[in-house]
Image (cartoon, rainbow, N blue to C red):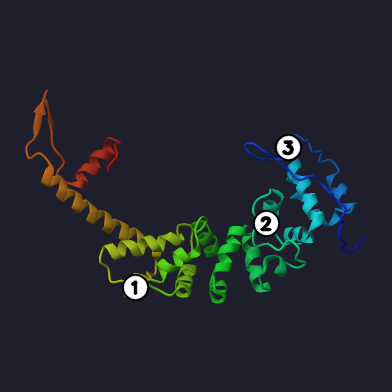
Amino acid sequence: EEHWKEYKTFRIPAPVHAVNGPMSRFDFTYLRTEGLEQIFTKSDLKYLWLDGYVQNLPPNEMIQYVRYGMMHRSVELLLKAGFTKLVWMKISQEPCRGINWQGKSLQRILGLPKRHVRKMQQINPDTNTLRIFRELTEEERDLISAELLEKLTDHCRYRSLSVIRDRVELYIPFPKWIRYMNEQSGPRIYTETWLDYIEMCRNLGAELNRKKILLPEDLRTAHDMAVACWNEKEDERKTEGIRRNARQDDFAAGGLMILPADSQKKLSLESAALNHCTS
C-alpha cells in the first residue's frame, strides 16, 4: 500500500551477547546482493531502500535495519534526511539516548525546531553531537557554526560542555566566544587552541583585559607566538638551573674533550643533533 502502517507481527531475533561483546547469531551469514534493490522496492520494504547505503550493510546489520525500519518510521525519515550516523548507531546496537524513535517528523524525532534540524543536517551528527547541541542555550544554538559544533563535540566527547563554558566565562561571555571562534574556524584551529593560548598568556603575565590580547585577530599566529615566548621563558629558567649545577671545568680523557652545555638552547641543539630526548 502507498501509506504507512505498523506491522505489529513482524519479528526478527535480536543479537545475542558473546563473551567478548555483542555478536549476532547471523555474523556468519553470507548476503547475496544480486537483486537486492528489487527485494526492497517490490515489497513492504520499499520505503527503506536507499541506494548506496543498503548494499553496504553487513548481514547482521541488514537484519537489524529491516527490523527497526519496520518498527519505526523514524528510521526511514532520518536516513532520507541524511542522518546516517544515527541510523547506523541504532542498527549497530549503540546507545542512542535522546532520540524519539516513535516520532513521525524530524522535529519530533530529534526534539529540535526546524531551523536547528537543518543545521544538524549539515553535520550528520551522532548522539554525542546532539547532546552538546542541546546543552547550548537558544542564543548559542543560533550562533554556532556547524564546523565549530563538530570541534566542540570532539573536545567534549567524554565530558560536559559546562567544563569549557566555565573556563571561557572566566574571561568572556560564552556567546561572544562562539562568535569569535566562528570567525577563527579553520583546519588548524581547535576549541582548545584558544584555551591553551589564554593559559599561556596568563602565565606570561599578559594583560587579558585588553581585547587585542584576549581575542587576537589571527588566533593561530597569536598561539604560536605565545608558545615561542613561553618556551623562551622556560629555556631561561632551565638555563639558570644548568649554570647553577653544571661542572665549571671541561673534562678531557682519551684525546676527547667534553664541553658541558651552559644553556638549555645548547642542550636542545645537541639533543636534536644526536636524536636524543631534550627534556
Distance in Å between CA atoms under marks 2 and 3: 22 Å
Image coordinates of residue 93 in percent, x first then y, are 68, 49
For marks 2 and 3 on the same chain, the one whose residue lies earlier in the sequence:
3
Left/right placement of residue 44 relative to residue 201 reads right
Q: Amino acid at mark 2?
A: Leu
Disc 3 residue crowd, few under 14, some 14–19, many 20+, Cα 10 Å = few
Quadrant showing the N terminus: bottom right
Residue 86 tag number: 2
Viewer-nearest residue: 104 or 141? 104
Disc 1 residue crowd, few under 14, some 14–19, many 20+, Cα 10 Å = few
In the rendered image, which quarter is residue 87 located in? bottom right
- Please say whether residue 222 is visible from this viewpoint: no
For marks 1 and 3 on the same chain, the one whose residue lies earlier in the sequence:
3
Image coordinates of residue 182 in percent, x first then y, are 49, 68
Viewer-nearest residue: 269 or 6? 6
Image coordinates of residue 36 in percent, x first then y, are 84, 45
Residue that appears at 57% across and 75% down: 138
Residue farthest to the top, as pictured: 254
Residue that appears at 86% across and 51% down: 10
Residue 27 tag number: 3
